[in-house]
Image: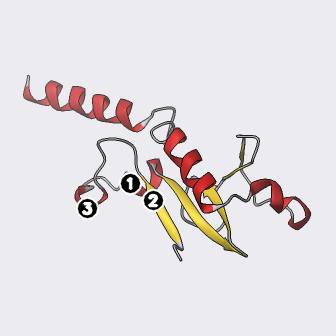
Amino acid sequence: MIVQQMFPPEGLDPDEDFHGDARLFSIWVIWKGKGKYAVQQYSSPDGPQLSRAGNWSHWAPEPFRRHQYRFTYDEACAWAEKLRGTLTINGRTYQQVIEWRASLDAKETA
């Protein structure tokens, strides 16, 4: 049984993550019990969760609504692949952060 799986954005190797971006920009598939998984923005228990309708909830769903936020493992992985690279932190995707860092490096060397 897989307890959690990280789906980092393309080009982000969690083993070589100098800035600590992997946990922030990755989609997580996390086992929630009874054969069901959640798709989350962070690996913490209270991270934003994806509903079956494809919307992010920024709070833990109430017990009577949890079924709307639970997937089979294959469904959760399919959503994670689809959403890989779309998360934003401070208004930027991982790719935009990489470009921003490169522009800062170029200014420092100029």
Within-10-Å neighbours for mark 3: few <14, some 14–19, many 20+: few
Query: Depth check: 76 or 60 in front?
Result: 76
Query: Depth check: 45 or 91 in front?
Result: 45
Position of 63 with respect to 105 (left or right) is right
- Mark 3 to mark 1: distance in Å? 9 Å
Pinpoint residue 72: horizontal percent, then vertical percent.
66, 60
Residue type at mark 3 is: Asp
Q: Are marks 1 and 2 in contact (CB under 8 Å)?
A: yes
Q: Is residue 33 above or below residue 95?
A: below
Residue ID for mark 3? 15
Question: Quarter-wise, where is residue 31 in the image?
Answer: bottom right
Residue ID for mark 2? 6
Pinpoint residue 105: horizontal percent, then vertical percent.
17, 32
Residue ID for mark 1? 22
- Badge nearest the viewer, 2 or 3: 2
Pinpoint residue 16: horizontal percent, then vertical percent.
22, 57
Q: Are marks 2 and 3 in contact (CB under 8 Å)?
A: no
Query: In the current view of this chain or complex, which residue is farthest to the right?
Result: 64
Sooner in the amino-acid sequence: mark 1 or mark 2:
2
Question: Quarter-wise, where is residue 17 in the image?
Answer: bottom left
Pinpoint residue 61: horizontal percent, then vertical percent.
81, 59
